[in-house]
Image: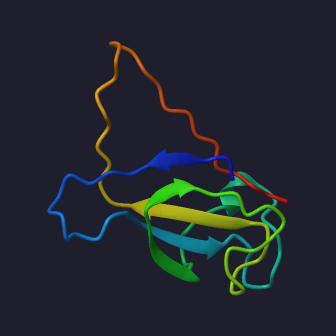
Amino acid sequence: MGLSFSYNSQERSNAIRGITGEYFSALDALGNVPTSAAGYTFAGKTPALVRTDPAISFDWGNGQLVPALPGDYVMGRWTGFLTARPAPTASGSVTTTGRDCG
């Protein structure tokens, strides 16, 4: 998937650590692959999996995340709070790539 974040909560020590991940099939109700970027939407979709991820860093290779999702055309949405560590210099960047379409 090419997306990597690490998560470190500053909350109480017995708190659940992680960020909530919701995973959806990008296929339409008939099993068709979206033909444009507009087809990749969460609108009207129910997540096939909801879990707490300690980090957003995955390599599923040729496998599936879970049997309820296809091997390709999967969308993920994460909610929670991230706290960035202080950078050693005054500049920094975050680079993400998040599309895996087979």
| Residue located farthest toward the front when viewing the structure as drawn | 13
| Image quadrant where one finds the C terminus | bottom right
Apparent side of residue 34 relative to residue 13 in the rendered image (left or right): right
**Quarter of the rendering containing residue 65:** bottom right
For residue 59, say whether it is visible: yes
Compared with residue 37, is residue 29 higher up or lower down, i.e. above or below? below
Q: Residue at x 57, y 78 (%)?
A: 45
Residue 7 percent across, percent down from the top left:
38, 51
Compared with residue 46, is residue 27 higher up or lower down, i.e. above or below? above
Residue 53 percent across, percent down from the top left:
46, 66
Apparent side of residue 96 relative to residue 74 in the rendered image (left or right): left
Apparent side of residue 30 relative to residue 24 in the rendered image (left or right): right
How many tags in the picture?
A: 0
Q: Residue at x 26, y 54 (%)?
A: 9
User: Foreground residue, 31 or 93?
Assistant: 93
For residue 47, say whether it is visible: no
| Residue located farthest toward the left when viewing the structure as drawn | 12
Residue 62 percent across, percent down from the top left:
84, 65
**Quarter of the rendering containing residue 90:** top left
Q: Residue at x 55, y 68 (%)?
A: 42
Residue 75 percent across, percent down from the top left:
63, 65
Colour logic: rainbow
Q: Residue at x 45, y 61 (%)?
A: 78
Apparent side of residue 95 relative to residue 69 in the rendered image (left or right): left
**Quarter of the rendering containing residue 27:** bottom right
